[in-house]
């Protein structure tokens, strides 16, 4: 199946597809032959067809304050990119970011660690602040997948996803649920009210000390 917006041929497309494009579609403005390879070609076509942002969140330098938040799922992705950069010591002006971050996590909100420990969100953020650069000069990556969200009441969103960390040669992940509310004065920005995590099965030994949220 080829969706309308994927009427594109990346630069490293199969020879048969390139031949078909030359014979049948070179003059069709609805079909693009991207100059970039692989996923970069898809990103190029998204920009050409004005279907949305054509820059990967990881390519945005100031991921916590650059551009409009596109929804609860985008909020989660941008936060965990920031989370990775914070622990790698790659964030400039960390004090300013901590002030902003505490306005994102509600003062009466709570976090349930995958170990079962229940703490206030601001206590967890205080711990997170102290972890600045604790993964510097290490191979450390954070990402989310299997992400879904639903509006459970007016302006209140439940976001579910698997959150992963890899540090050195060890990886671990947990099922994460976040309840967040749209801000009244800025409906495209969100306040995190509750976060609950449980370990995913079959991943071996869990490092409950270095796993923050």
Image (cartoon, grey):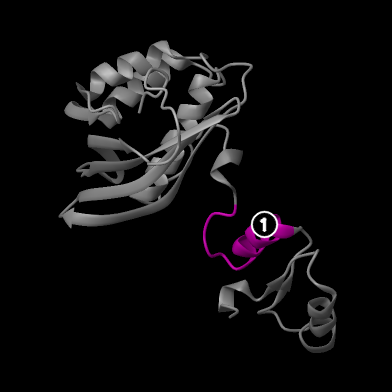
Q: How many marks?
A: 1
For the record, the magenta segment spans: 38-54
Is residue 187 visible to the viewer in this orientation of the structure?
yes
Q: Which residue is mark 1?
A: 39
Q: Quadrant of the N terminus?
A: bottom right
Q: Position of residue 190 (x, y in %)?
A: 28, 41
- Secondary structure under the numbered disc 1 in the rendered image: helix
Q: Is residue 112 magenta?
A: no
Image quadrant of residue 36?
Answer: bottom right
40 or 144: which is nearer to us? 144
Q: Position of residue 210 (x, y in %)?
A: 42, 19
Q: Residue at x 15, y 54 (%)?
A: 154
Question: Magenta span: helix, strand or loop, mainly?
Answer: helix
Q: Position of residue 24 (x, y in %)?
A: 79, 89
Q: Residue at x 25, y 17 (%)?
A: 123
Q: Is residue 194 above or below residue 117?
A: below
> In the picture provided, is 69 more to the left or to the right than 36?
left
Q: Position of residue 168 (x, y in %)?
A: 60, 25
Q: Residue at x 38, y 41 (%)?
A: 201
Q: Quadrant of the C terminus?
A: top left
């Amino acid at each position: 199946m080829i969706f309308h917006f994927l009427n594109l041929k990346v630069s490293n497309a199969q020879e048969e597809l390139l031949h078909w494009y030359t014979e049948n579609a070179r003059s069709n403005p609805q079909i693009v032959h991207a100059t970039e390879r692989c996923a970069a070609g898809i990103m190029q076509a998204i920009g050409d067809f004005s279907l949305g942002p054509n820059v990967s969140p990881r390519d945005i330098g100031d991921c916590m304050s650059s551009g409009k938040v596109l929804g609860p799922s985008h909020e989660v992705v941008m936060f965990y990119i920031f989370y990775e950069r914070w622990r790698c010591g790659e964030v400039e002006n960390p004090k300013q970011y901590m002030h902003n971050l505490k306005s994102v996590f509600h003062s009466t909100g709570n976090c349930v660690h995958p170990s079962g420990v229940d703490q206030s969100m601001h206590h967890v953020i205080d711990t997170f602040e102290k972890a600045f650069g604790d993964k510097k000069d290490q191979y450390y990556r954070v990402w989310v997948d299997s992400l879904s969200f639903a509006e459970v009441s007016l302006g209140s969103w439940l976001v579910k996803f698997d959150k992963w960390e890899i540090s050195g040669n060890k990886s671990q992940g947990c099922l994460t649920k976040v309840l967040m509310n749209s801000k009244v004065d800025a409906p495209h920005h969100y306040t995190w009210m509750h976060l609950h995590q449980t370990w995913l099965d079959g991943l071996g030994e869990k490092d409950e000390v270095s796993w923050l949220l």
